[in-house]
Image (tube, rainbow, N blue to C red):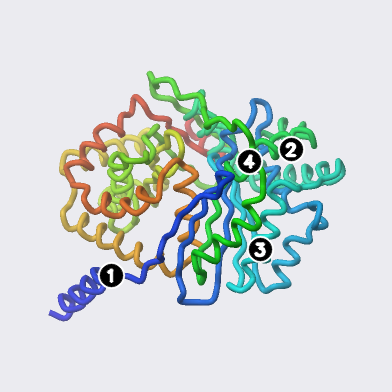
């Protein structure tokens, strides 16, 4: 009875309307979209500028330039010396950073609400007035090369995933690493950086998101003052990218490295992304990944592979459809000691087949949907996370209406639709299976 009361109280709490940010959107005359996420619970604000350009938009042979330019934007402008931007943010009690993906590049500051105008003036300044000497470029290029050395070249797991992506995407630039291939990073120069900057860093290719203790009319006045005067890039074409050809057979790869302590497999499938006005396929795959591998103790793969058969010490699934082009649906399995590659893959195949045959467990499905409602409520407490959610979606081709509709689409997805999605996506003939192994494992199979 006590457990029942707790469950009912929790359910009541989750069905009570949460304090949600008020969303206001408008566009400046130069084409810049502005989104205000109004939340007055704390005197804090997050400003983010998202550019609709990422690693998948780079010219051929110039991989890494989007990420490289992200570094260079912390150099000087006509008004600020190199490094002064971040120093001013820090002096005003705030923090700042940036990040690059295949579909976007974003810059943000988190400060007290009364410092927003200062942040906006500096961010607008570096949208068009970046200055960088040849020495700045060479120095920062070395920094990027060192970053690749530390995070990728010296990490077997990173190298393995890089090769796996290249095998998944034969034609689409999602198969090229965001940081770039080393031999191409080494050739990037000032001319490359400026050409990319002048074309894509423009108000008509950017989204300003301001979240926190602000009034929309104040944001509009500041945005008009600082960003509104910036000239757009004329005739900026819509993003077009090569598409993937149909996959006609399964692909496999093995990556061997003496640093690897534990072999594991990742299997991926090309999967549809969230599309504006039609997010149902992505919703089904989102729920499928959570059911299959969202929690080691309660997920389908966790129970079948880790607990029932002891074939794995870890199993999970992943999918994130918030991308401009086709995404990937993936499975991960770390086999238990003594379980061979063949046995591991057979166990994984059997677990997936059993799931499709048995269908979705109603209790697990109900718990998952409740967890999604709860996470939605908790996410409202983090204005930076909220701003990121909107920025990632908007730069991936979605609209504010799509973002608002997404939770209901998830909740309205049925168990039968998820099983249908599983039958369609989990086609081994259209999979890419990769193994990363220590040398000893290879020697044992010889």
- The picture places residue 78, in percent across and down from the top left corner, at 81, 52
In primary-sequence order, the first of circles 1 and 3 is: 1
Q: Is residue 213 left or right of residue 272?
A: right
**Residue 157 visible to the viewer:** no
Circle 1 residue: 17
In primary-sequence order, the first of circles 1 and 4 is: 1
Element type at mark 4: loop
Using the image, tell me which numbered label, if any, was put on residue 44: none
Residue depth check, mark 4 versus mark 2: number of the one nearer the observer: 4
Using the image, tell me which numbered label, if any, was put on residue 119: 3
Find the distance from the CA under tag 1 to the CA under tag 4: 41 Å
Circle 4 residue: 232
In primary-sequence order, the first of circles 3 and 4 is: 3
Q: Is residue 23 above or below residue 391?
A: below
In primary-sequence order, the first of circles 4 and 2 is: 2
Residue depth check, mark 3 versus mark 2: number of the one nearer the observer: 3
Residue depth check, mark 3 versus mark 4: number of the one nearer the observer: 4
* CB atoms of marks 3 and 2 within 8 Å: no
* CB atoms of marks 4 and 2 within 8 Å: no
Residue ranking furthest to the bottom: 2
Find the distance from the CA under tag 3 to the CA under tag 2: 24 Å
Which of 351 and 107 lies nearest the eye of the viewer? 107
Element type at mark 2: helix
Residue depth check, mark 1 versus mark 3: number of the one nearer the observer: 3
């Amino acid at each position: 009875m006590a457990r029942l009361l707790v469950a009912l109280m929790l359910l009541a709490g989750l069905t009570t309307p949460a304090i949600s940010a008020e969303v206001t959107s408008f566009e400046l005359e130069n084409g810049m979209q502005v989104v205000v996420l109004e939340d007055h619970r704390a005197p804090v604000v997050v400003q983010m500028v998202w550019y609709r350009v990422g690693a998948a938009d780079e010219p051929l042979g110039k991989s890494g330039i989007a990420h490289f330019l992200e570094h260079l934007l912390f150099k000087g402008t006509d008004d600020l010396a190199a490094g002064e931007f971040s120093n001013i943010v820090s002096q005003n009690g705030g923090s700042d950073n940036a990040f690059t993906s295949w579909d976007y590049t974003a810059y943000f500051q988190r400060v007290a609400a009364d410092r927003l105008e200062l942040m906006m003036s500096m961010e607008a300044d570096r949208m068009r007035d970046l200055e960088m000497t040849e020495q700045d470029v060479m120095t920062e290029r070395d920094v990027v090369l060192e970053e690749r050395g530390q995070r990728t070249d010296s990490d077997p797991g990173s190298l393995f995933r890089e090769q796996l992506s290249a095998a998944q995407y034969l034609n689409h630039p999602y198969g090229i690493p965001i940081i770039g291939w080393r031999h191409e990073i080494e050739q990037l120069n000032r001319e490359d950086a400026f050409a990319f900057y002048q074309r894509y860093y423009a108000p008509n290719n950017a989204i300003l998101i301001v979240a926190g203790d602000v009034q929309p009319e104040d944001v509009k006045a500041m945005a008009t003052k600082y960003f509104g005067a910036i000239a757009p890039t004329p005739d900026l074409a819509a993003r077009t990218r090569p598409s993937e050809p149909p996959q006609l057979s399964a692909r496999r790869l093995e990556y061997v490295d003496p640093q690897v302590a534990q072999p594991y497999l990742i299997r991926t499938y090309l999967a549809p992304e969230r599309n504006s006005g039609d997010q149902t396929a992505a919703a089904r795959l989102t729920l499928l990944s959570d059911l299959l591998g969202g929690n080691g103790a309660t997920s389908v793969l966790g129970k079948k592979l880790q607990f029932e058969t002891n074939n794995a010490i870890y199993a999970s699934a992943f999918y994130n459809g918030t991308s401009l082009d086709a995404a990937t649906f993936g499975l991960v399995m770390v086999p238990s000691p003594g379980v061979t590659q063949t046995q591991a893959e057979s166990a994984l195949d059997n677990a997936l087949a059993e799931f499709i045959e048995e269908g979705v467990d109603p209790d697990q499905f109900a718990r998952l949907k409740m967890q999604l409602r709860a996470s939605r409520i908790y996410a409202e407490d983090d204005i930076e996370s909220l701003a990121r959610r909107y920025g990632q979606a908007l730069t991936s081709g979605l609209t504010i209406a799509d973002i608002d509709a997404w939770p209901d689409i998830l909740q309205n997805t049925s168990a039968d639709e998820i099983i249908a999605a599983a039958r369609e996506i989990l086609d081994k003939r259209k999979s890419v299976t990769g193994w990363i192994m220590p040398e000893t494992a290879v020697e044992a199979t010889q």
